[in-house]
Image: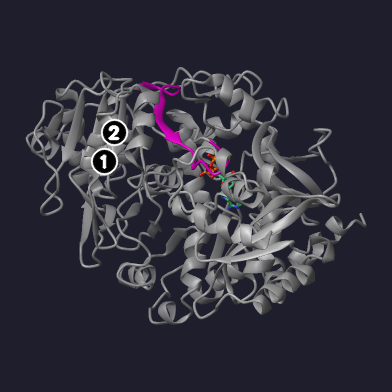
Amino acid sequence: MSSPEAKRLKPNSDNMSGPKAIYDAATSSNFELYKSDHAASISDISSYWSELANSKLDWYAPFPNAVSGSFEDGSVSWFAGGKINVCYNAVDRYCNAPYNRGGETAIIWEGDEPTDTKYITYLELQNNVCRVANALKASGVSKGDVVTLYMPMIPELTYTMLACARIGAVHSVIFAGFSADAIADRIEGAKSKWVVTASAGKRGGRDLPLKNICDAAVKKERCVGIVEKVFVFDGMVPNGSGWIEEDIHVRFSDLVDCQRPVCPCEWMDAEDPLFILYTSGSTGKPKGLVHTTGGYALYAMHTTAKSFGIAQQTGPSNGNAPVYACVADAGWITGHTYIVYGPLLNGISTFMFESTPMYPDCGRYWDMVQRHKISVFYTAPTAIRSLMRFGDEAPKKYDLSSLKVLGTVGEPINPAAWQWYYELIGNSKCAVVDTYWQTETGGHVITNLPGVTPMKPGSCTLPCYGIEVIVLDPVTGKEITETEAEGVLVIKQPWPGMARTCLGDHQRYLNVYMKPYPGYYFAGDGCRRDEHGFIWITGRVDDVLNVSGHRIGTAEVESALVAHPAVAQAAVVGIPHEIKGQGICCFTTLAEGFAESDELVKELRNAVRTHIGPFATPDMIIPTSALPMTRSGKIMRRILRKIAAGELDTLGDTSTLLDPSVVGTLSEKVEKLR
Ligand code: ATP
Ligand code: MG
């Protein structure tokens, strides 16, 4: 290939001495083993997953068949007919023989204040989960009911999720930063009779009036008549605000405290729903996805072990168990799979973090790594970039030598942030795992594996076991068989962790994921496959630019911008352009110590020309103090597209937009440049 696009494949992987070295060093026998194991795993998915399901999970009744159904009609099911309980597998079995891990730490909790920590053993977890389960049952919650959770990052959140799993209720966790409207939509969507909240939460030194927000939600007309009880954990925050005794409220802490710590598990069909969770809303109205029991549990457990290089703990750890910390919020899929279910299903201890990376200062993460001797640390590119902005001083103050694996998720990580994470946080010794996945996939689908497959900064690398990743030509829909390829990312065969439907709207599920390229699961992301077969996510398919006939990924232009020391974060969108069809519009926030100037804009324009080529020269560069972000910390390019095009009256769903005032500020800046 000789197009500009094809030439760009090489520089990504070879231009930097570090990554090249990393690539070569890891081309080892383990990598060869991965290749043959991966090929075997996708040649017979049914045997691959059923062997794992039988050896890794405890079943109450065996499943007759591993997989059935098809993508086309969205009928895929895994292990149907098998009976299992996820809470039993994540908690009870580790308290008993042969594991005997009842006295080992299940949860390390660190509150908003660094001095506020708790260690909860597996046995304590079991007792607490049973108490909550009994309290729910005593209040009328039964198998199949949807329980909405709007809670701070406190252990009670994990207890309640597991208690639901224990009694067969379906949890629907809503991130505790959402507004009353967003809660009301989700309660209405799931016809959820039960809501669990807390009197208040704490984050970054501030009280969050969770119960008040919840009250406002359940009083909305669309929720009246749906919600029967609101269970309120109180007492964890002094002066918990806004307690008003009404029929609907239950003082949950009191009710839980007086329950027996024993509650039998409800044996569920593997295909019974385990939870509902909404996507981030980066590309449109959030989708409520339904995950089921057996397949999700296996996928969460397996990917946690493989991606982070962790072994299932099968006996007492004698003090040398890994300290695993995913600092996401349990309100997102990352929290569901990699704080709650994945780690506990492996019998390891998991970290729950209530605060923010900036509280009390920008050294909080690194202080926690030092104090808890964290060995696996998992966060998002947005957090890494915002910490980079404050320079190298903070991480250098702490002993980070316990770290072995560093993970990233949520967006493409630009090579500059990758390098900072690798060199400064990992002391050039840790594996950085760039995990690509979605709420819909339930767990990682593409990532390098520590010590097994090589890494390349900015590439999520290679498919997970059991996942057959294909690159399709976006126009013809045909598979591109050459190693070097650019197109849309699809998955060819079902996997156990995939979401089964969109809540109450199976047609939407089919339209979004299954219909665009019949016979494949369509992820909605564009990608490029390089000469080694490594995947580079180029951005959402809707975001790929077509500038004078050149396809340019937004992620690529953003990487070029963020590589400049003045740029903290960049977001790139297309704007209508008379000659080129589409022009390139870049929004950037600046690093500490840099100011907006014409000179800087010129420099940034040149940086993109040098990194990618003159055909990718930006038409507009707009420095700003903030970008529109989802509450999960992702850039909302669809809102930026509207701002850049001056179409403020058709912004679309803004319920997950963190700070709506950004829209006005940015559109003023755009107007000035027109
Ligand atoms: P919505 O589906 O509502 O638009 P969303 O796609 O942001 O929101 P999530 O399920 O939270 O909701 O995010 C999944 C998406 O995040 C992926 O489709 C991909 O675009 C992006 N993503 C996640 N991890 C990575 C990664 N490691 N590299 C590149 N992109 C990633
Ligand atoms: Mg999505």
Quadrant location of the C terminus?
bottom right
CB atoms of marks 2 and 1 within 8 Å: yes
Residue 15 image offset from top left, x and y in percent: 76, 72
Q: Is residue 477 visible?
A: yes
Q: Residues within 10 Å of mark 1 (few under 14, many from 20)?
A: many
Left or right, 519 with respect to 223, comes to: right
Q: In the image, which residues are magenta?
A: 268-284
Q: Please name whichever residue, 658 or 160, is drawn nearer the observer in this view of the structure.
A: 658
Work out whether 584 lies above or below 650: below
Left or right, 473 with respect to 652, comes to: right
Disc 1 Cβ-to-ligand 1 distance below 8 Å: no
Q: CA distance from mark 2 to mark 1?
A: 6 Å
Q: Which residue is mark 2?
A: 217
Work out whether 390 lies above or below 479: below
How many numbered marks appear? 2
The picture quadrant where one finds residue 45 is top right
Residue at figure coordinates x 41%, y 71% from the top left: 402
Quadrant location of the N terminus?
bottom right
Residue 77 image offset from top left, x and y in percent: 54, 22
The picture quadrant where one finds residue 125 is top left
Residue at figure coordinates x 48%, y 67% from the top left: 386
Q: Amino acid at mark 2?
A: Ala
Q: Which residue is mark 1?
A: 213
Residue 452 image offset from top left, x and y in percent: 61, 58
